[in-house]
Amino acid sequence: MKLPEFRIVRRFAGGWRVALAAMAVAGCAHASQPEPKPDTLNVFGMHQTIELAPVHFAAARIYPGGAAVHNGGIPNLFAPPGEIRADVATHAETQALRNSLEHPNVRIILTIARGHYRIVARRSAGISSLADLRGKRIATMLDTSAGFYLHNVLASAGLTQADVQIMSLPRPRDISRHIIEREVDALAIWEPEMQRAIDALGDDAIIFAPDVDYDELFNLNTTAENLADPTLRVKIVRFVAGLMQASQQVMAAPDEAIGMVVATTGYPVELVRSAWPHHTFPGTVADDLLDVLVREETWLAARQGRPARDREQLSRLIDKSVAEEARALLASQQANH
């Protein structure tokens, strides 16, 4: 049975009404959405991800203004005329690095989620250790956070990409079928496709989660121009404050947020629930964000055959002032209550 799409309909004086629209969806909830009102905060994020849970929760339960959560990401910050342009957009840090080459005005303003990655492999492919990945077929998406994680894991075993056979696929949805159907020997991708593969493989699955000092950093992004707009900045700060509150609530009591992820992604509830513990939701700018950007920039630059930007250049992509203002806003609200 296909699940309905979760979307925000409108805000009433007495609070939010959230619709579980009775429209069938396949894949990533690509059903059309109503045109937002002119004063709506347009938020973009990949609807197929668990990491987006606090965004859905903040928009539906906390944020005091109208918010529409569209399917997309950082490129929507630069949508052409005639298309809905993002005010804020979510994506892993890898995509901020990639998009900021053409758009150096990208700004990372909050870390919404940390994805704690792992690799699953098939014992029947002769894999019992990371060293056994040599020569094996591995499905992932290169030039993404999953690809960077795989790079680090291979390095921890003294391997490089040249030592394995990479199947780089264009979309994460249903990527697990390639290992389930034995087309590849190992898989590295974000949840819940990893959990789906593990469940399907059963005793044939072997899981590796070495400490490679890297988590996916799923961030909220905007542009320098958006932050320089006084009216829009107020809305963004208020939304970030809502995300901070949502992060605490979805970690303490995740059931409703899991339901939102299920309705948005179409993944089964038990699959999402099993994959949920492989995420944390800090609701702040990650302390290690710049360190990760520096390491990942070196990797991306080598892959793209260009010079790597230095630490000072990359630091300009991070703007902590929005999170600071959001924390001050929450403190003021708390004091007034």
Image (cartoon, grey):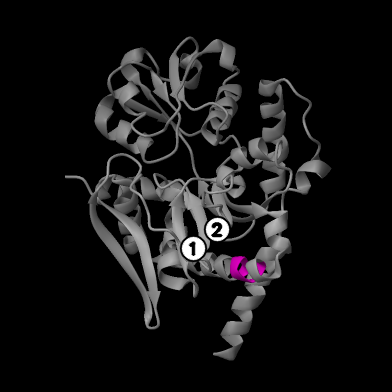
Q: Position of residue 251 (x, y in %)?
A: 43, 61
Q: Which residue is mark 2?
A: 282
- Horizontal relation, residue 151 to residue 193: left or right: right
Q: Which residue is mark 1?
A: 247
Report the magenta stretch's main SS: helix
Circle count: 2
Residue type pointed to by label 2: Pro
Which residue is pictured at 56% across the width and 22% down the height? 154
Circle 1 sits in a helix, a strand or a loop, which is it? Answer: helix
Q: Which residue is at the front of the view, 302 or 44?
A: 44
Query: Residue at the front extreme?
Result: 82
Which residue is pictured at 53% across the width and 45% down the height? 73
Q: Position of residue 48 (x, y in %)?
A: 39, 44
Q: Which label number is shown at residue 328?
A: none
Q: Earlier in the sequence, mark 1 or mark 2?
A: 1
Reply above or below: 213 against 328: above
Residue type pointed to by label 1: Ser
Examine the rendering and report whether any part of residue 54 can be seen: no
Q: Which residue is at the front of the view, 112 or 63?
A: 63
Dividing the picture into quadrants, the one containing residue 149 is top right
Circle 2 sits in a helix, a strand or a loop, which is it? Answer: loop
Which residue is pictured at 70% across the width and 22% down the height? 302
Give the crowd class for mark 1: few <14, some 14-19, many >=20 residues within 10 Å. many
Residue 235 lies within the magenta run: yes
Which portion, as a residue range, is magenta?
233-237
Look at the image and tell me in which quarter the N terminus lies.
Answer: top left
